[in-house]
Image: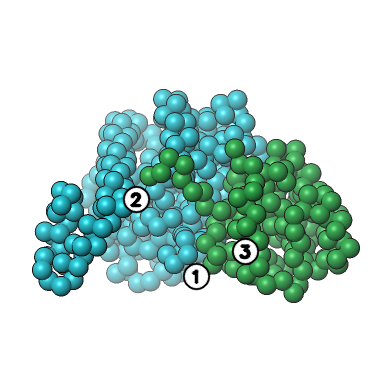
Chain colours: A green, B cyan
């Protein structure tokens, strides 16, 4: 065994808010699994604190959120805040947003700590590639 | 970490899981503080309700004021090593409780229903001060029985209509249960399942403990009290019979053996070792050598 073994990339896929279905989130979860990542899936109707707590306990590299209801500007930053309170910040964790998100909203989300936002037309392969490219830049010490 | 920093605990678990040297140093330092937690394993077929039963047990132990660690294992893909770890979906009501710590693990190629790092993860949670640690296996078929060696008490989660009685006669997973839960027992066929299991158990040789069969409906919380009582009774029996210590010794033996085996394999899989393996594989494939002779030669370094 190597002294510093390669860490498997771990991703939390979560849906904050009251959306009733999670088809898109499941497709992304499946695609990341097929890209060799370990995906912790927590299901629908999660509060920001529940998501942050799961991210903490599972020590994930990536927090990927999906909202379809249009409440992303309200919910996504609250998840980042709940994570920050637990020491999980954009320096040590990638925050990704998904859903039906207009470009101007995506820019606003990036201000709050999201490194990328993927809309309805995004290819799942691009999401996996993005994660693989940016996880090594995180400060995981 | 011992200052109850949950984030530090989470980082240590990652190091331990990936075989990182920092994880091994940490485990050496923490190990003397472990050995106080009660460990309960939950196993059963995919969809039997292991996660929901685990959730119910965790709530019951929390009501008694005991802190709880949960280790939930799901399978890794044999092709990509990716995994979907979905056991948390059934445990969302535990998230807001700071005295419950849930960690999902991927099996990462291990075949016995756990992952290679499961025992180490349990030791760290134990040293951290968890009173009860619940270990949920991957959806198990018939032969994934490692949990019996990893936990003090093994709960097998069954459901009604899981096949005819011949299934209950087969060797393997049916033999390792200390407590049998029949979950979803509000469904038709529950009575038949309970009596089939009891009939099977009546044929068991006397091992000093008769595994009880407990009906539960985990989604409704029905039967949880009886299940907890059955786990407690088993634990009491382990203590009074002295089998708690002998099982701990056996667990230690198994873990040393497994780690030594992994070490030997790692030492063989060097670059030079791979070259020798290729040469030996050629000999075996072309019938110049038989597999047993080649394996002995590989181990001997020739």
- Write down the quadrant of residue B170 in the picture: bottom left
Circle 2 residues within 10 Å: few <14, some 14–19, many ≥20: some
Which marked residue is nearer to the observer: mark 3 or mark 2?
3
Which residue appears at 47% of the width and 42% of the height? A4
Query: For numbered disc 2, what is the local secondary structure?
Result: loop
Q: Which residue is mark 2?
A: B146
Please check whether the numbered discs 1 and 3 fall on a single chain: no
Residue sticking out furthest to the bottom: A121
Which of the pair A36/A13 is nearer the observer? A36
Apparent side of residue B12 relative to residue B257 in the rendered image (left or right) = right
B59 in relation to A40, above or below: above
- Separation of residues labelled 3 and 2 (CA atoms): 36 Å
Circle 1 residues within 10 Å: few <14, some 14–19, many ≥20: few
Tell me which chain the residue with mark 2 is part of: B
Apparent side of residue B69 relative to residue A52 in the rendered image (left or right) = left
Name the spot of residue B68 as percent of width and height, x first. 55, 38
Which of the pair B181/A82 is nearer the observer? A82
Which of the pair B100/B302 is nearer the observer? B302
Q: Are marks 1 and 3 in contact (CB under 8 Å)?
A: no
- Separation of residues labelled 1 and 3 (CA atoms): 48 Å
What label does residue A129 carry, if any?
Answer: 3
Q: Is residue A23 visible to us here?
A: no
Which residue appears at 74% of the width and 74% of the height? A121
């Amino acid at each position: 065994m190597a002294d510093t073994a390669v860490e498997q990339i771990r991703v939390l896929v979560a849906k904050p808010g009251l959306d009733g279905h999670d088809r898109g989130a499941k497709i992304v979860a499946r695609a990341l699994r097929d890209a060799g990542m370990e995906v912790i899936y927590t299901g629908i109707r999660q509060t920001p604190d529940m998501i942050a707590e799961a991210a903490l306990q599972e020590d994930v590299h990536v927090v990927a959120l999906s909202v379809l209801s249009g409440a992303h500007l309200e919910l996504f930053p609250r998840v980042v805040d709940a994570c920050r309170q637990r020491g999980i910040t954009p320096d040590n964790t990638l925050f990704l947003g998904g859903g039906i998100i207009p470009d101007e909203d995506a820019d606003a989300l990036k201000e709050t700590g999201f490194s990328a936002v993927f809309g309805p037309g995004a290819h799942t392969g691009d999401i996996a590639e993005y994660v693989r490219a940016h996880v090594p830049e995180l400060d995981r010490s | 970490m011992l200052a109850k920093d949950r984030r530090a605990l989470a980082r240590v678990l990652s190091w331990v899981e990936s075989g990182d040297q920092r994880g091994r140093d940490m485990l050496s330092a923490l190990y003397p503080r472990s050995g106080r937690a009660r460990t309960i394993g939950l196993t059963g077929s995919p969809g039997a309700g292991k996660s929901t039963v685990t959730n119910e047990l965790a709530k019951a132990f929390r009501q008694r004021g005991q802190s709880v660690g949960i280790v939930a294992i799901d399978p890794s893909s044999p092709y990509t090593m990716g995994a979907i770890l979905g056991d948390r979906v059934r445990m969302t009501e535990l998230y807001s409780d700071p005295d419950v710590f849930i960690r999902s693990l991927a099996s990462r190629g291990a075949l016995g229903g756990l992952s290679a790092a499961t025992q180490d993860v349990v030791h760290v949670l134990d040293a951290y001060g968890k009173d009860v640690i619940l270990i949920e296996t991957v959806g198990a078929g018939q032969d994934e029985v490692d949990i019996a060696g990893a936990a003090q008490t093994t709960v097998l989660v069954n459901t009604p209509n899981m096949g005819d009685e011949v299934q209950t006669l087969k060797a393997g997973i049916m033999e390792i249960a200390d407590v049998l839960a029949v979950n979803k027992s509000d469904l038709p066929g529950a009575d038949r399942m309970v009596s089939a299991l009891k009939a099977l158990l009546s044929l068991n040789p006397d091992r000093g403990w008769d595994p009880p069969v407990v009906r539960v409906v985990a989604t409704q919380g029905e039967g949880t009290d009886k299940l907890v009582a059955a786990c407690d009774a088993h634990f009491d029996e382990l203590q009074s019979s002295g089998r708690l210590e002998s099982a701990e010794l056996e667990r230690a033996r198994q873990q040393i053996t497994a780690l030594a085996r992994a070490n030997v394999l790692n030492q063989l899989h060097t670059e030079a070792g791979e070259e020798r393996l290729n040469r030996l594989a050629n000999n075996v494939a072309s019938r110049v050598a038989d597999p047993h002779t080649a394996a002995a030669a590989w181990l001997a370094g020739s």
